[in-house]
């Protein structure tokens, strides 16, 4: 397994698992999408959109996610975005109970659909959403004692694919729809409509937040994370990462989770330009709904 440390410091590149070989474009071309998810009314909101607060509203706290152990970041980004989407839908009145998404299943299934089962780590965002749309998802609870996150299980299912019995369990729990997000305006509209957005790119960052919770662009990571909010006082988006609760370090702002950081708009636009970012929607058909008032502002 990859190590978290290099010369005593965390090395993000050791766990980056997004492949930028063009395969995501091929898979994206096969996906049914719902552009309405990312369509706004032409007016940019003036208040911050803080979808991540849905976690707190439903669970009473932010999730205590484990840090990834191999290059399975694509499954972390999409699995945890699906977790937030569950909470958003519950806040909208969906009669459901929250269940944490099993990331190892998404990892193995995405690699299976992409034709990349094997020893090397990695996957595509497009492959993950295709798996969620066509195969489905499973919760950690559904897997019982095998549901605790395991890098070894992710490695095994990334090599052989998930067991057929688990695939059968996933079938009733398919994602409703997705939309490919390529611009800032589409991102804002998707969040405004209650859809978290997964992001895959080579953009790296510093690992220390500034006084407003922002990290600066630095270096290159082939990495998947997801966006759970936008702000307009200092235009940027809230990125949720997969390295555990203590990274990045530094101040928090706007009640953001400790496993997140803000990034400024031009950096976000560069990430979206990579062409493998996806808005997730529970509903098969888009329906415009007002967000709870508590998810706006400071």
Image (cartoon, rainbow, N blue to C red):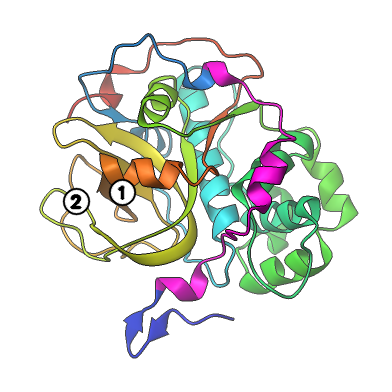
Question: Residue 198 at x, y = what percent?
Answer: 50, 42
**Crowd rating for badge 1 (residues with CA inside 10 Å; few <14, some 14–19, many 20+):** many
Q: Which residue is mark 2?
A: 213
**Crowd rating for badge 2 (residues with CA inside 10 Å; few <14, some 14–19, many 20+):** many
Above or below, 110 relative to 190: below
Identified at 42% across, 33% down, the residue is 58
Inspect the magenta stretch and tell me whether residue 157 lies in it: no
Extent of the magenta region: 12-36
Identified at 49% across, 47% down, the residue is 274
First in residue order: circle 1 vs circle 2: 2
Q: Which residue is mark 1?
A: 257
Quick one: which residue is furthest to the bottom in this view?
7
Q: Is residue 128 visible?
A: no
Q: Which one is in front, 181 or 101?
A: 181
Identified at 63% across, 69% down, the residue is 150
Above or below, 21 relative to 240: below
Left or right of 219 in this view: 144: right
Question: Residue 66 at x, y = what percent?
Answer: 48, 63
């Amino acid at each position: 397994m990859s190590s978290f440390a290099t010369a005593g410091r965390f090395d993000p590149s050791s766990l980056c698992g997004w492949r930028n070989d063009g395969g995501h474009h091929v898979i994206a071309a096969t996906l049914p999408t719902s552009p309405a998810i990312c369509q706004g009314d032409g007016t940019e909101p003036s208040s911050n959109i803080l979808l991540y607060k849905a976690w707190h509203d439903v669970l009473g706290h932010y999730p205590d996610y484990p840090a990834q152990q191999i290059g399975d970041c694509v499954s972390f980004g999409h699995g945890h975005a699906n977790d937030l989407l569950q909470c958003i839908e519950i806040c909208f009145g969906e009669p459901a109970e929250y269940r944490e998404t099993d990331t190892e299943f998404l990892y193995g299934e995405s690699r299976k659909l992409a034709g990349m089962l094997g020893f090397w780590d990695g996957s595509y965002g497009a492959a993950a959403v295709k798996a969620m749309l066509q195969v489905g998802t499973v919760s950690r609870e559904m897997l019982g004692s095998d549901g605790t996150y395991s890098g070894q299980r992710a490695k095994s299912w990334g090599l052989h694919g998930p067991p057929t019995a688990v695939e059968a369990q996933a079938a009733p729990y398919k994602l409703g729809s997705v939309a490919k997000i390529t611009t800032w305006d589409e991102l804002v509209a998707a969040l405004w409509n209650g859809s978290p957005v997964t992001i895959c790119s080579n953009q790296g960052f510093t690992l220390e937040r500034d006084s407003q919770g922002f990290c600066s662009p630095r270096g290159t990571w082939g990495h998947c994370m997801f966006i759970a909010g936008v702000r307009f006082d200092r235009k940027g988006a809230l990125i949720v990462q997969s390295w555990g609760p203590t990274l990045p370090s530094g101040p928090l702002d706007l009640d953001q989770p400790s496993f997140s950081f803000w990034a400024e708009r031009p950096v976000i636009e560069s990430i979206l330009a990579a062409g493998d970012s996806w808005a997730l929607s529970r509903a098969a058909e888009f329906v415009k709904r007002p967000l709870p008032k508590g998810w706006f502002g400071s």
